[in-house]
């Protein structure tokens, strides 16, 4: 029997473009004759029954806004049996027959647990870290890249004016995609990512010295969050090279802001695609983008995939930045 009513929620770390995905889910579903409810506050909202009906106008004027209008949460309770039971009884109470979960890998594990209990879920990758292996671009990644690039450009102006070195920490706990791409885009002298074994002398000091020997006198080293220690590195660079060095941790400003065109279009496509999957009777799938096309994978299969950093890109970046 065809489904009649679906829900949508955002979970885990927020990402710019999540609103565009919510909008697409709600509008696609309504325009195809489904009822749609929004769950506010991630899995916590599902447990507590913070569930509200949506109409075409509920999602007006959000496509251009960062964050998520449905709020997000990290819900330890959802991972308990009691929490899961409460979530399921809320779905039954509200006649929700399918759920679109917009979030990262943790959120997809939760969606998988729900599906296993007989509750069809579809995951949409919304995370700025781009750490969903089956998906080339996750929602929010492009915006975060552009935000980081702008912030580093600003730092560069002052570094160049004073002949300083800047060590900048960008987001990416386990993935160096932001660090690598931002590093290329801003011409960083050094790029430090979790995927490559880190050697402070080789990757930082020697590169600064090499660039300085050819006449460069301001430097930016981009470091992924997973490596961290930027304050310590800045002190050590100053001690070893005599260059006035500052550390900057960009932090949560990288998450926010107006989503880029790319993220809005990607999120819109993924939202529509997710609803179609539910209409086709599919469940436990993650929507992904590959070579510009949307595809979908079993959640378990998607979570087991390993994403590797493009080492040719990394080596090219190092070659052209001195
Ligand atoms: P993200 O989705 O951005 O990776 P989290 O890892 O914080 O963010 O996950 C978001 C929520 O998903 C968690 O608060 C929890 O409720 C749920 N979740 C995370 N991991 C699991 C898991 N292994 N099993 C079930 N639910 C999970």
Image (cartoon, rainbow, N blue to C red):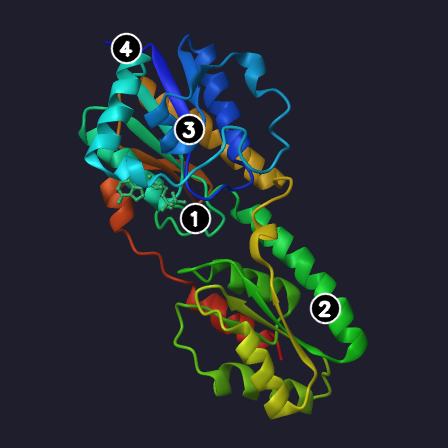
**Quadrant location of the N terminus?**
top left
Classify residue 23 as left or right of residue 218: left
Q: Earlier in the sequence, mark 3 or mark 4?
A: 4
- Residue at position x 60%, y 29% from top? 63
Q: Earlier in the sequence, mark 1 or mark 4?
A: 4
Look at the image and tell me whether residue 298 can be seen.
no
The picture places residue 289, in percent across and down from the top left corner, at 42, 41
For mark 4, give the secondary structure: loop
- Residue at position x 45%, y 51% from top? 130
The picture places residue 173, in percent across and down from the top left corner, at 43, 60
Q: Which residue is mark 1?
A: 136
Q: Which residue is mark 4?
A: 2
Q: CA distance from mark 1 to mark 4?
A: 32 Å
Vertical relation: 95 (above or below) 146? above
Decide: few, some or many residues near mark 3? Use Cα within 10 Å; few <14, some 14-19, many ≥20.
many
Q: Earlier in the sequence, mark 1 or mark 3?
A: 3
For mark 2, give the secondary structure: helix
Q: Nearer the viewer, mark 1 or mark 3?
A: 3
Q: On the rendering, which quadrant does ligand 1 occupy?
A: top left
Marker disc for residue 274? none
């Amino acid at each position: 029997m065809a489904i009649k009513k679906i829900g949508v929620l955002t979970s885990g770390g927020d990402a710019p473009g999540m609103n565009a995905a919510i909008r697409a889910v709600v509008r696609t579903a309504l325009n195809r004759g489904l009822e749609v409810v929004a769950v506010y506050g991630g899995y916590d909202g599902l447990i507590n029954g913070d569930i509200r009906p949506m109409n075409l106008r509920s999602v007006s004027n959000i496509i251009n806004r960062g964050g998520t209008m449905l709020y997000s949460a990290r819900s330890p309770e959802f991972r308990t049996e009691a929490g899961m039971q409460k979530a399921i009884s809320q779905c039954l109470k509200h006649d929700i027959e399918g759920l679109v979960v917009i979030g990262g890998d943790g959120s997809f594990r939760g969606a998988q647990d729900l599906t296993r209990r007989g509750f069809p879920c579809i995951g949409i990758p919304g995370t700025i870290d781009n750490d969903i292996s089956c998906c080339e671009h996750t929602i929010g990644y492009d915006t975060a890249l552009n935000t980081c690039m702008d912030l580093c450009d600003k730092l560069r102006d002052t570094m160049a004016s004073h002949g300083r070195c800047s060590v900048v920490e960008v987001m990416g706990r386990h993935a160096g995609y932001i660090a690598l791409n931002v590093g290329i885009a801003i011409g960083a002298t050094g790029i430090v990512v979790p995927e490559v074994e880190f050697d402070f002398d080789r990757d930082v000091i020697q590169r600064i010295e090499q660039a300085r020997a050819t006449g460069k006198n301001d430097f930016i080293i981009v470091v992924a969050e997973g490596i961290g220690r930027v304050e310590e590195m800045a002190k050590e660079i100053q001690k070893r090279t005599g260059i006035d060095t500052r550390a900057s941790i960009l932090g949560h400003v990288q998450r926010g802001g107006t989503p880029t065109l790319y993220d809005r279009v990607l999120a819109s496509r993924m939202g529509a695609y997710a609803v179609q999957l539910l209409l086709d009777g599919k469940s436990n799938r993650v929507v992904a983008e590959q070579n510009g096309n949307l595809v979908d994978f079993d959640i378990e299969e998607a979570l087991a995939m390993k994403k590797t950093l493009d080492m040719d890109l990394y080596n090219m970046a190092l070659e052209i930045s001195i």
